[in-house]
Amino acid sequence: MGGERDSTDVRDEVSGGCGTEGHACGCGESDGPALPELDAREIPHAIRHATIFGALDGVRPGKGLVLIAPHDPLPLLAQLEQRAPEAFTIDYLERGPETWRLAFMRLVA
């Protein structure tokens, strides 16, 4: 019936994953070849670091993400090193003056 699904269909998708590597939410989407980007400029300041840490916590070993920031995120990098010492490699892709782009890659343990 025109796109309607019952709860059994959803349970089957979630239990079996959506077919992408390590991705088991059942959404049917897949990651492209490029690293996903998180634009911190769009996140309210009050929850910015918590949101970024949440995203980094979800990065699997050998995978990464690109952070786009409105300034050099040195305080965030110091906090990350305290939270997860040596868990990521970090490479600057762009260094201001208006936008900073950093690639975070989680090391394989």
Image: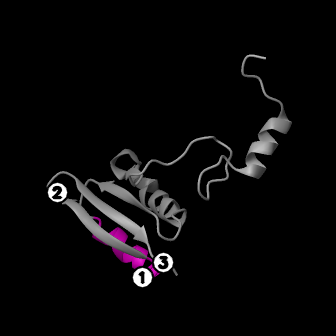
Q: Nearer the viewer, mark 3 or mark 1?
A: 1
Q: Amino acid at mark 1?
A: Glu
Residue 35 rendering spot, x and y as whole percentages: 40, 55
For image coordinates 22% across by 52% down, the residue present is 99
The residue carrying pointer 2 sits among few (fewer than 14), some (14 to 19) or many (20 or more) residues within 10 Å by Cα, namely few
Q: Earlier in the sequence, mark 3 or mark 2?
A: 3
Asked if the magenta segment contains residue 76, the reply would be yes
Farthest top residue?
A: 2
**Residue that mark 1 sits on:** 86
Relative horizontal placement of residue 67, taking residue 87 as reference (left or right): left
Residue drawn at x 36%, y 68% as measured from the top left: 76
Q: Is residue 20 left or right of residue 14?
A: left
Residue holding disc 2 = 96
Q: Secondary structure at mark 1?
A: loop
Span shown in magenta: 73-87
Identify the residue position indicated by label 3 in the image.
83
